[in-house]
Image: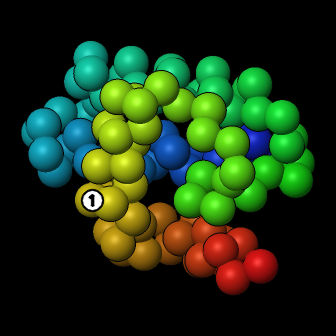
Amino acid sequence: MNRIQEEKKTVEQMLRIYCRKVHHNDLCGECQALLVYAHQRLDACNFGEEKPSCKKCPVHCYKPDMREKIRRVMRFAGPRMILYHPTAAIKHLLRERK
């Protein structure tokens, strides 16, 4: 699996955790729209396989309102990833250290 595909999978996992815990749904319309948007942004990423984590990226490719929504999701789901998706969480933490 390439870097962009991994990122897509991770963002979907985070959105599903967030939606289940906050909206009490598997993936509501609002979260589904955010997932589609995130996937579109990842597909258009200029960095490709050299993509840094969003936090360290010099290019903010999300519109401000969408950036705030994804930030909220990541803030909530990030700490929970170690419980629900430990492999993805560990990979992310290792990339952050680079």
In the image, taking residue 25 as reference, residue 61 lies left or right, namely right
In the rendering, at what x and y percent does residue 40 appear? Answer: 63, 21
Is 54 placed above or below 79 here?
A: above
The residue drawn where x is 75% and y is 25% is 44
In the rendering, at what x and y percent does residue 10 appear? Answer: 55, 50
Give residue 94's quadrant in the image: bottom right
The residue drawn where x is 48% and y is 26% is 63
- Seen from the viewer's position, the closer of residues 59 and 9 is 59
The residue drawn where x is 37% and y is 49% is 71
Give residue 97's quadrant in the image: bottom right
Is 24 placed above or below 52 here?
A: above
Give residue 81's quadrant in the image: bottom left
Is 70 placed above or below 92 here?
A: above
* Type of colouring: rainbow
- Seen from the viewer's position, the closer of residues 44 and 61 is 61
Image quarter in which the C terminus is found: bottom right
Circle 1 residue: 76
The residue drawn where x is 87% and y is 53% is 50
Is 29 placed above or below 25 here?
A: above
Identify the amino acid type marked 1. Answer: Phe
Which type of secondary structure does the marked residue at label 1 adopt? helix
* Number of numbered markers: 1
- Asked whether residue 2 appears in the rendered view, the answer is no
In the image, taking residue 66 as reference, residue 22 lies left or right, namely left
In the rendering, at what x and y percent does residue 93 appear? Answer: 60, 77
Q: Dot 1: few (<14), some (14–19), or many (≥20) neighbours within 10 Å?
A: some
- Asked whether residue 31 appears in the rendered view, the answer is yes
